[in-house]
Every structure is written in C-alpha cells, then in structure tokens.
Image (cartoon, helix red, strand yellow):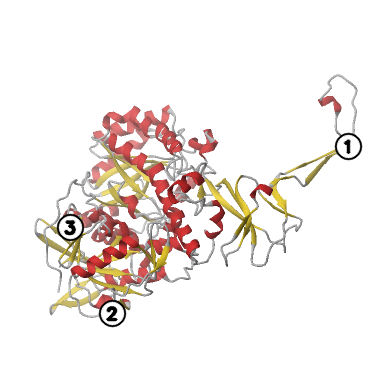
Amino acid sequence: MPPRNRPAAQVTRKLFHKTGLAYFWVFNDRCNPDELQPQLDAFAKSGEVAALCLHPRPGLLLPYGSTDWFEFIREMCKRIAKAGLDIWLYDEDPYPSGAAGGRVFQERPEFNARQVERFVFDPTVMDTEFFTFPPGDLLWCGLTSEATGERIDLTPRVGVLRRKWQTWETWDSRFFYPDTPRYTTHRADTGSPEYGLVTPRIPEGFRLMAFVSRPIQYDWIAWGGLVDTFNPNATKRFLELTHEQYKKYVGDMFGKEIKAIFTDEPKYFSKNPWTPGMAEDFKSVYGYDVRPRMFWLDSDSMCDEACITRLQWREYCGKRFEESWLKPVSQWCRRNKLNLVGHISPEDDPIEQANYVSNLFPLFKHFDLAGIDLIIPAVGDHNHPLINVGCVSAASAAQQRNQMGVMSETGACAGEEPPIKLIGKILKWQTIMGVSSPLIHCAYSSVRGPRAFEYPPNYGPNNKPAWPGMTAIHHELADIQPVMRDARQVAPVAILWTIRSFQMQNIEWQTDPTGMRRGLTALLAACLDRQVGTHIIDESILWDVKIGRGEATIGRARYTHLLIPSSTVLHEKTVRKLRELERAGVKMACTGDVPTRVQSSRSIDPLDLNFVPSSTIDAAVAKLPRLIELDGDTLDIRCTAWEKAGKTQRYLMNLRDTPFRSKIKGKPVALKAGQVVVI
C-alpha cells in the first residue's frame, strides 16, 4: 500500500528564483556589452530563463580580476537587471574555485596546495648505498612493518645529497676580475639536491619509507597549481580578490537583482593533503602524531591501528576543509545577502568522496541549494546506477535540513551538437527526483576557434538550432517545477550512507574490489526500480532524528524503514540510534555484508549487529512500501511523490528508450520513452 500522507513540516525559506532554467552565460572572448546585447535580448524574450550566471572561462580576452573586468561585470549586471532577469555571480576563472584566477598562490607561493608524497626503498631498481627521494617538507622517514605495526624512526638521519656532476671546460676568471687577463681552468660541481640517508639494515618484514610534503601539480589545471583549501589565510585572500571586489562594484545589487554566487568544485584534490601546522593540529584533536602512522594511509591492512588512523585522517581532512574554506565563503555570502549555490564534487562516487572531501553530507548545509553536477548525457537507469547517488543524496539532504531545494549543473560533455531530446529527458528525470534549480552548462557567448570544443555543447541563443529546443524544455518542466517547490518528498525508506566504510579502507576507485560501492548502488537502484520513495541518510543526520512510534523524522523527511547496505563499520552513536529505532518499531535490514566493527572516539572495536536482520537486496526491497503498485517488469520506471498543502502529487517516468505499458489497480497505463505522467 502507498504510504499515508502526513502534514509537511514548515519550510523556513522559499526558493529565491522563478521556475525555468538557469544558464552559465560564458564570457570567453572579447567582452563587448553591445555585441552581447542580442544574446541577452534572446534570453529575456524566451521567458524561460530563471537566472544568468556570469561565468568567465577559457578564451577570455579581458584581464580577469582587473578593474576592466569588474567594470564590465557592472555594466552587464545593469543590462541584465533592465531585461528583468535574475543574476548569479561566479567566483572563479575558470574553476575550481579558490584561486582567483591563480593569483592567490602565484602572488603568495605559501598558499599553493601541498600533498604528502610517499617514497619506498626498492633495492631492485635503486642505488643500494643510499635511499634518496625528492626534497620538500620532510615529514617522516623510517622502517615500517605492516604485519606488526612496528616502526623505527630514521628521520634525523636524513640529509641532503648532491650526486649529479656538471663540468665546465672554459671557466673564465674575468667574471670575478674584470679588466684583467683571462685565466682558465677546469671546474666541476654537483647539483640536483636530493634528500637521502645511508641505507640501513632492513629487518625482515620491514620497508624503508619516507614521507615528504610537496606542492601539487596538475597539468589539467589552468594555473598549473592549486590553492591550499586547508589554509584560512588563503581563503581570506581569495575573498579579498573576488567577493570583496564584486561587492565594491555591484554590491548595491546584492540581495536584489543579484541573488546568488556560484562556487565550483572546491575540495582538497589529494587523498593525502598537507598544510603547515597540520601535524600539530591533528595531534591536538586526536592525541597522537600522525606522521609515523602515515604508512597506514595507503596500506591495505585492516588492523585496528590502520583502520582508526585512516578514519581519523579522513575525518580531520573533511573538517579542516569545511572550517578553513567552505564555512568562511558561506558566511561571507550570508553576511552580504547572497545565496551560496554551486557544488562540490565528487557527488556520486563514495570512494572518491571519501578521499577528496571526506563526506559531502555535512557540507551541504553551507549551501542555500544542495548542489550537484552531471557531466555525462545520461539518466540514472540500469546502465548508470551510480549517478542516482548524486540526485538522491542532494534531494535527501535538502529535505532533511529544510533547505530551499537542489541545484544541478547539467549538460556538459554531451557532444558538439546539443542532443536536445536527451537533455530534456535528463532534466525531467532530475526534476522528478528533486532537482528544483537546473543550471545549464553552458551558453557560450563565443564559439570562435577552439572555444567550440571547450566542454561542449553550446546551449545558448547563438546556437540557432538548439535554442528553440531549450525553450521547449522549459515548457515541459513548467507543470512539474511549481509542484515540487517548497514541498515534502514522500520517501518512507532511508538507505544509510555508509561513507565511513569507504573512509576506513584504502580502495582503488576504478575497480572497488570490496564490492561496497556496487552494493550501495544496486540497493538504491532496486528501490527506485520498484517505485519506492527513497532517501539516503548520513550517520550524522541519523543521530539527530526524532523517533516516534514506528517512524523517524527530521526536517521534512519521515522514515518508517531503514536499510544498511554492504559495509564494514558504523559509529558507536549510529549503533545506539539503531537500537532506539528497533525498539520504536522502525523496520530495518542489512543487505550484503553486515558491518562487524564500531568506531568510538578513540578506537575500533568488534560489533555484533544481531538486532538488525540480514537480507538479500531483493528480499529486503520486496517488503518495502511502494508509492504506486505497477504490474510487470518495472526496471527503469521511476516514481516520486510530493506533498504540499495537504495534497500529494505522484510523478511516473519512463527512463527507457522504448514505450512502457502496465496496469495500476487494473487500469492500464502507457508511457512513451522519456515521458512523465501524473498518477
């Protein structure tokens, strides 16, 4: 039976923009406002644009961050406001956010992001007399045993070696003594300094290792480096160069014509980041020096010390990023009457998320719209189960935290010619799944030369074949978007977000030999394929739920069932909450491997979760309440339900490329490929 309706919780803030599609309006060439005016007129005439986000990108021929740039932005903001459209600013050139076009660390090299690099002595390919490695900030060097956890500190024995000789045949004394006769001699010197130590005797079962902090270098990053998002002074400098300058030039429009500022993919870009003072700060939080334990970070060992070290390391990194970068940016926006929008990737993959942001769920609260990104032309069907995670996670967080809605940056990397029909299908799928604020990537102001191939396609008014189709998509969404605004999603089933299990292990992200990621996505897909109203709930959010008779509530969310996917560890607070839920009559099940460890504040201990029954995915999902009862094969058929003002609206969508026919309570229902109907 479909779950009964319940009154929606009061929503504290309403969406700040009208229905429709927002667009990245890309400034990637000569920025002449008069030449851009026809595009602006087309945006305004369409009647379907919710907002324009002013986005500098590769090809920009106006020096970013200069007075010319900010004066151009002011002129464009005035024109956009006159056209009756909302404005979102964008905080970087081009991305990821935090570098102010690279100036933050180009001008202050100490703000360049660093990472821990590990070097392991290998006598089969290295000089056996010395163990040498590249210089940097030496963190620790020594002998380690993964079997016993024993380590022998050799850090004081490390020094500098120069073994690369260079010779000069014609040394000239006149460099030192001008206007004198020339005296010559042979000269030679050593260069290319290395760190090294005389190779010690290595006991059986030990490895000789060194850990050095060095600047991160990425070829694909426009600036050649990255900003240190662990350093609050770097964040302060970023805000001075971008946000404060926007405030100087267009601050009088903040909270009025300018509604929001977009931040794009900030994170810490290395699974083992580092910043000065980190060792001391980590020790003040966890009570030990992490440097002698760094060999556990990339180890496959599941001994207690290895597990707690990885868990606390990733917990610390996520919190450090949140406090040093995201929180100051969010607070600046709120002080200045701007909504913070944007997204932090990866949104879908729990393995990469554990490595590069620790856990996205606690970070959603700093945004006014829970944000995600989709950069492939696909929907969350049986061929793409992973991309369900992003949509469902953001929609869940928005409901649990009473946020205004969900923003999705959508449309990049869909080919050179926009597949309008497919983009429409993607946007409809995202909308019924909870995306209230779609942002199209991108409307390029110029496609001159290589600009046409910089993350195509172009969905803007200057792409005449595509633009009418984008307007048509708006009309398809027009009936759906208003229903979902400020509504409660009917989702009685919550899947526990077991990110802690991914944090505890060293997992190769492309293959995932643990199978936990496949278990998570398979469980979520099974629920969605059976038209089960489903959310994902983080452990930290679970701790705050209020428990009634047979139900857990938080924000607008109401849960009668909780599923725990294949996992290895839970927090002790989670275990206590699960016992409370079980006693209150909330139905629970573990699917796949049952977690056997529990994390406390200081240790890892055995866990017996015998009060939560174990089940296969199919058996567990078969017992769940459905939003609607459909006959036959319902693979890739989605249903969501939204409640507002005491009324519930159910949407049914066919994600298949072929028609779908079924019956609901004996009555036939038919959906074309990609069609959405109200049930």
Q: Secondary structure at mark 3?
A: strand
Quarter of the image holding residue 576? bottom left
Tell me: 11 left or right of 132. Answer: left
Q: Residues within 10 Å of mark 3 (few under 14, many from 20)?
A: many
User: Which sits earlier in the primary sequence, circle 1 or circle 2?
Assistant: 1
Q: CA distance from mark 2 to mark 3?
A: 28 Å
For marks 2 and 3, give the one nearer the viewer: 2
* Residue 37 image position (x, y, % from top left): 32, 36
Left or right? Give the position of 609 relative to 663. right
Mark 2, Cα crowd under 10 Å, few <14 / some 14-19 / many 20+, is few
| Residue placed furthest toward the left | 646
State the mark number for residue 404. none
Residue situated in front as seen by the camera: 129 or 381: 129
- Residue at 48% of width from left, 42% of height from top? 228
Q: The disc labelled 2 sits on which kind of residue? A: Ala
Q: Which residue is mark 3?
A: 488
Relative to 557, 245 lies left or right: right
Q: Amino acid at mark 3?
A: Arg
Q: Earlier in the sequence, mark 3 or mark 1?
A: 1
Helix, strand or loop for disc 1: loop
Q: Looking at the picture, how far across and down is residue 29, in whole percent?
A: 44, 38
User: Which of 372 and 138 lies nearest the eye of the viewer?
Assistant: 138
Query: Where does the N terminus fall, quadrant-wise?
Result: bottom left
How far apart marks 1 and 2 lie (CA) works out to 83 Å
Number of other residues with Cα within 10 Å of mark 1, as a class: few under 14, some 14 to 19, many 20 or more: few
Mark 2 lies on residue: 619
Q: Position of residue 112 (x, y in %)?
A: 52, 41
Residue 245 image offset from top left, x and y in percent = 38, 30
Asked if marks 3 and 1 touch (Cβ < 8 Å), the reply is no
Task: Mark yes or no: residue 488 visible.
Answer: yes
Q: Earlier in the sequence, mark 2 or mark 3?
A: 3
- Residue that mark 1 sits on: 186
